[in-house]
Amino acid sequence: MGGTKRRPYGSTAKTRQMVLAALGVVKVATAEQIRQLMCPGTAGAQTVRNGCLDLGRDGLVESLGSASRTNAAGNLVSEKLWNLTGPGLEAAAAVLDRPVREMGGTARGAARSGAKHAVKVTDTITAFLQTPPEPTRPVPRKKRQPAATLSDTDVGKDPAADPVAVEERPRGLGEIGSWATEVVLPVSGTLSTPGKNSPRADAVLTVPEAGVPVMFVEVDNGTENPVVLSRKAGRYREFFRRTVKPPTPSANPHATGKPVPMWETLYGPLGREGYPPLAIVFTKQVGVAAMSNRINSVMRLAETHWAGRYREFAASYGSDERDGYTDYSDAVPILVTTLGRLREHGPLGRVWFRFGHPTWQTLPDALDNPDDERAFNRRERRRDQLHKQQRELEEQQRERQRQEQRERWAAQEAAAEAAREPDPVCQKCHGPLESSPFEYDPLEEDAPPADGVHCAGCRIQLAEPTGRIGRVIRRLVNGDERYPRR
């Protein structure tokens, strides 16, 4: 594609913006890396290289060094490293819509020295993004091929206008604007003048919409021993522990006035317990055993920073059963993977091994804490539910026993009632032969002795007093009107 006087290399505005955005984040990269990072669907790196050359004429980018890599044919090739100039840093800030003070440096020193570590950081970010390779349509040739070389189905078509086939890639995470590199995390001091031993994150990923509010990434080229890596985890923990005054109520109407973690004021809350995750990406290609040994060494040395604290309780009141959970409120979730795994499966595949977990997992599973207080509370609710069901069953059993006892008593009373002889009655008045033993009957005192067939009243009547006094008494006592007064 021909250039112009202003753009002699013929780059488009879109290409130049992609170059500025990429270098604004990764600081230093080759043209091939920028292509893989931003536009992997293009046939080659020449499109990006033309953009770099045109930006170089404007004084926005420069090349001060080179990097070596092995190409697809297995040959070692050397490529120019591109980095931003001072004006280019401001132009990249405008493309990324970021304040210039947050852009960091121009990485001129790293470019001069070959930027071995920065190149691996760029490869890591590329593996995270997995930018979809959009098919490109080359500019049609002005001179068509002879008709004899075309098939019947291709007559009238320009083969150069067909889209270039692209490779399939796994799903990625975030976009170029989701990343920042060489981020200072002050354990003391300020962001511009951090205190001693403040960590500097190789890269920081923020994708809240994907469930990753913030992730800090350390890229290990195999040049640091496990002790150094474990100490980095300790410095991250110191930064996470640092608290500052909360934002003013005008800026945050929900502020409580209590100190808040500094990292939360910079990146927002996680929505879960604990600190943000620290991901370590091993980029050096070594054997399986060597990689396992390195991971195990770092895990063992950094255990105090990631293990959490176990809290044990009695499962229920008065029970000998014990249960508990791991408190991760002061633990750093450390996830490890390799650059090869990231490239092959993407960051959403089963490429993460979290220290303390048993196997390789996807990112959501690796970030989860299956043995934290939530799991304990679920078990508690389950135990309470089982105890409630047990109490209900026991109460139902007791009620059945009470009902059975009542039924037995009723059956016994009915049987006794049926077996009991009827109370004797007076043959004369057919009333009760004897008065109740619980009630006083004055007639019993005046009645003749019991004869077994008459009640006290009838025995008095049958006594048939013949005297005048006796008849008067009978009329007064029994109301006998058969003997009128004389």
Image (cartoon, rainbow, N blue to C red):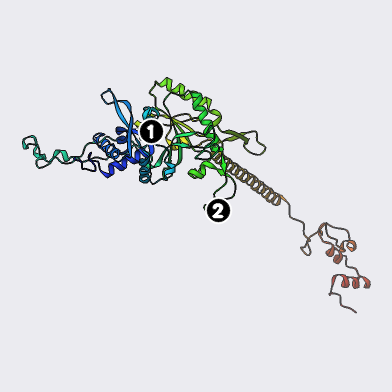
Q: Is residue 254 left or right of residue 128?
A: right
The crowd level at tag 1 (other Cα within 10 Å; few <14, some 14-19, many 20+) is some
Residue 189's label in the rendered image is none
Residue 90 percent across, percent down from the top left: 38, 43
Pick the front one: 308 or 445: 308
Q: Is residue 434 left or right of residue 408?
A: right
The residues bearing labels 1 and 2 have C-alpha atoms spaced at a distance of 42 Å
Of the residues shown, which amino acid type is indicated by label 1?
A: Arg
The crowd level at tag 2 (other Cα within 10 Å; few <14, some 14-19, many 20+) is few
Instruction: Say if residue 169 shows up in the picture.
Output: no
Residue 307 percent across, percent down from the top left: 54, 31
Residue 373 percent across, percent down from the top left: 56, 39
What residue sits 29% from the left and 40% below the top?
55
Residue 51 percent across, percent down from the top left: 27, 39
Residue 108's label in the rendered image is 1
Of labels 1 and 2, earlier in sequence is 1
Q: Which residue, given by chain and number where applicable, does mark 2 sit on?
A: 249
Rendered-image quadrant of the N terminus: top left
Secondary structure found at label 2: loop
Instruction: Say if residue 315 shows up in the picture.
Output: yes
